[in-house]
Image (spheres, rainbow, N blue to C red):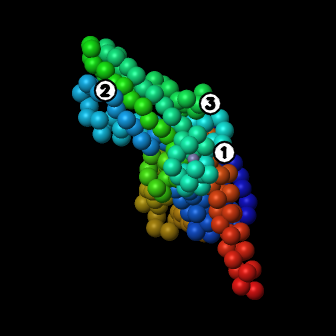
């Protein structure tokens, strides 16, 4: 397998994986979305809510706020915790949210008891409070995975596509029609011939094929090479998200290996 980093930002990573099957690339994508545990607000108690939103709407909004922890490993998933899932500081982070209008209540107003835990983004709007309206909430966040509920989904926009090879026939006369129609500036005329420049950005729209004689341009997927794009919800840096997803897959493969060894 070959790995080539194409783009790395805090919340997004894009890389080329070669020498793997589509199932493997898809496994990474799925693990990023559904198997990497993160924190999300799970239960709330509303002591006061005189805002225009129903209690349930406030609860839904809080559940979707991405939460960062300096050391996520210090929290267990409830079912793996020594408390047996009853709830304790090892598997829960309590929070308080108290506000009185006029104001906009933002995600930064959620105050966790663990100072190393916080909302990833400060300015996610929760609700507008008018003069005299109040919101007083207590609750807790727990750690879980995206397949349980989308609020624990660590990867949001995760996808992959085959790397493409673009072949241009020798009969090309350099007219430039394909260059004009390409929405991604993949093609250029150099000398008297068209040439593909950055095939990784090709969307396989095939507009260039339609612009020329039939068969003159061929856009072919490379079956064992994939451009993988992973976007984090904000709970984890994208690089860590992919590393943790890969670790999950590895752990399962090792479990399977151990089970098969028992049969031998
Ligand atoms: S449209 Fe066809 S002939 Fe014209 S530059 Fe593109 S490949 Fe060459
Ligand atoms: S398939 Fe679409 S994006 Fe790719 S080179 Fe042709 S026109 Fe450009
Ligand atoms: Zn516990």
Looking at this view, is 88 or 19 the one in front? 88
Which label's residue is closer to the chain start, 3 or 2?
2
Alpha-carbon span between mark 1 and mark 2: 33 Å
Residue at the left extreme, as displayed: 52
The residue indicated by pointer 3 is 116
Q: Residues within 10 Å of mark 3 (few under 14, many from 20)?
A: few
Q: Residue 48, which numbered label?
A: 2
Residue at the bottom extreme, as displayed: 264
Q: Residues within 10 Å of mark 2 (few under 14, many from 20)?
A: some
Looking at this view, is 250 or 110 the one in front? 110
Q: Residue at x 27, y 25 (%)?
A: 51
Q: Residues within 10 Å of mark 1 (few under 14, many from 20)?
A: few
The residue indicated by pointer 1 is 73
Residues at marks 1 and 2 touching, judged by CB atoms closer than 8 Å: no
Q: Residue at x 45, y 23 (%)?
A: 109
Q: Residue at x 68, y 57 (%)?
A: 247
Where does residue 232 sit, x and y in percent of width and height? 55, 44
Q: How many marks?
A: 3
Q: Nearer the viewer, mark 1 or mark 2?
A: 2
Q: Quadrant of residue 45?
A: top left
Alpha-carbon span between mark 1 and mark 3: 12 Å
Looking at this view, is 97 or 236 the one in front? 97
Q: Residue 104, which numbered label?
A: none
Where does residue 82 sit, x and y in percent of width and height? 62, 51
Element type at mark 2 = strand
């Amino acid at each position: 397998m070959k790995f080539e980093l194409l783009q790395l930002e805090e919340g997004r990573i894009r890389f080329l994986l070669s020498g793997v099957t589509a199932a493997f690339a898809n496994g990474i994508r799925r693990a990023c979305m559904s198997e990497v545990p993160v924190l999300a607000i799970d239960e709330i108690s509303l002591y006061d809510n005189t805002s225009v939103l129903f209690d349930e709407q406030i609860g839904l909004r809080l559940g979707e706020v991405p939460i960062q922890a300096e050391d996520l490993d210090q929290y267990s998933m409830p079912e793996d915790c020594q408390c047996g899932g009853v709830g304790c500081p090892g598997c829960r982070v309590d929070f308080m949210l108290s506000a009185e209008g006029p104001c906009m209540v933002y995600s930064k107003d959620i105050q966790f008891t663990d100072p190393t835990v916080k909302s990833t983004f400060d300015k996610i709007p929760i609700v507008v409070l008018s003069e005299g309206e109040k919101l007083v909430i207590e609750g807790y966040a727990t750690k879980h995975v995206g397949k349980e509920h989308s609020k624990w989904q660590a990867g949001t926009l995760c996808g992959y596509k085959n790397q493409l090879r673009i072949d241009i026939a020798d009969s090309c006369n350099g007219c430039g029609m394909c260059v004009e129609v390409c929405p991604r500036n993949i093609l250029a005329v150099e000398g008297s011939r068209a040439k593909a420049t950055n095939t990784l950005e090709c969307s396989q729209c095939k507009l260039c094929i339609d612009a020329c004689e039939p068969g003159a341009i061929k856009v072919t997927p490379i079956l064992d090479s994939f451009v993988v794009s992973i976007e984090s919800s904000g709970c984890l840096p994208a690089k860590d998200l992919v590393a943790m997803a890969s670790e999950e897959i590895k752990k399962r493969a090792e479990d399977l290996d151990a089970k098969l060894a028992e049969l031998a």
